[in-house]
């Protein structure tokens, strides 16, 4: 595939990916949007650009989500132990 066609294809795939990501999180709370987009494999900068916030806000939310998950796993372990 010539380089020009490859670049055009990559741009179209990028646009489709962004549209699907926006559709996935539409109408959800910001924290849920961040969680879902992170699970989908997007990085903080990409997530921030998609939902209209800063990468720092995304990083803070991801950190809080990881902390909640650790606490949840810990309490489940104590309940089962």
Image: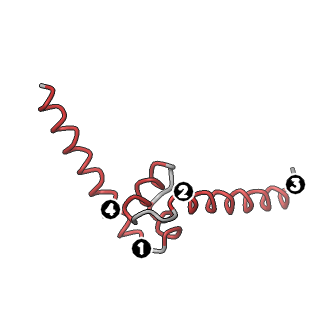
Task: Choose mark 2 or mark 1, whichever is in front.
Answer: 2
Please tell me which of labels 2 and 1 falls first in the chain. 2
- Looking at the image, which residue sits at the far right? 2
Please tell me which of labels 1 and 3 falls first in the chain. 3
**Cα separation between marks 3 and 4:** 41 Å
The residue labelled by disc 4 is 61
Please tell me which of labels 4 and 1 falls first in the chain. 1
Please tell me which of labels 2 and 4 falls first in the chain. 2
The percent position of residue 79, horizontal first and vertical second, equals 13, 31
**Cα separation between marks 1 and 3:** 36 Å
Task: Choose mark 1 or mark 3, whichever is in front.
Answer: 1
The percent position of residue 69, horizontal first and vertical second, equals 26, 45
Mark 4 and mark 2 in contact (Cβ < 8 Å)?
Answer: no
Total labels: the figure holds 4
Q: Which mark is residue 38?
A: none
The residue labelled by disc 2 is 24
Mark 3 and mark 2 in contact (Cβ < 8 Å)?
Answer: no
Please rate how many residues cluster around mark 2, counting C-alpha atoms within 10 Å: few if below 14, some from 14 to 19, many from 20.
some
| Residue depicted at 23% across the width and 51% down the height | 67
* Quadrant of the rendering where the C terminus is positioned: top left
Rendered position, 37 above or below 46? above
Task: Choose mark 2 or mark 4, whichever is in front.
Answer: 2
The residue labelled by disc 3 is 2
The residue labelled by disc 1 is 54
Please tell me which of labels 3 and 4 falls first in the chain. 3
The percent position of residue 63, horizontal first and vertical second, equals 29, 57
**Cα separation between marks 4 and 1:** 11 Å
Helix, strand or loop status at disc 1: loop
- Looking at the image, which residue sits at the far top? 81
Please rate how many residues cluster around mark 3, counting C-alpha atoms within 10 Å: few if below 14, some from 14 to 19, many from 20.
few
**Cα separation between marks 2 and 4:** 18 Å
The percent position of residue 16, horizontal first and vertical second, equals 68, 59
């Amino acid at each position: 595939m010539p380089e020009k066609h490859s670049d055009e294809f990559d741009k179209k795939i990028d646009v489709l990916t962004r549209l699907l990501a926006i559709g996935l999180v539409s109408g959800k709370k910001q924290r849920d949007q961040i969680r879902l987009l992170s699970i989908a494999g997007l990085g903080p900068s990409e997530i921030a650009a998609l939902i209209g916030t800063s990468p720092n806000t995304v990083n803070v939310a991801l950190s809080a989500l990881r902390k909640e998950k650790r606490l949840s796993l810990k309490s489940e372990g104590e309940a089962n132990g």
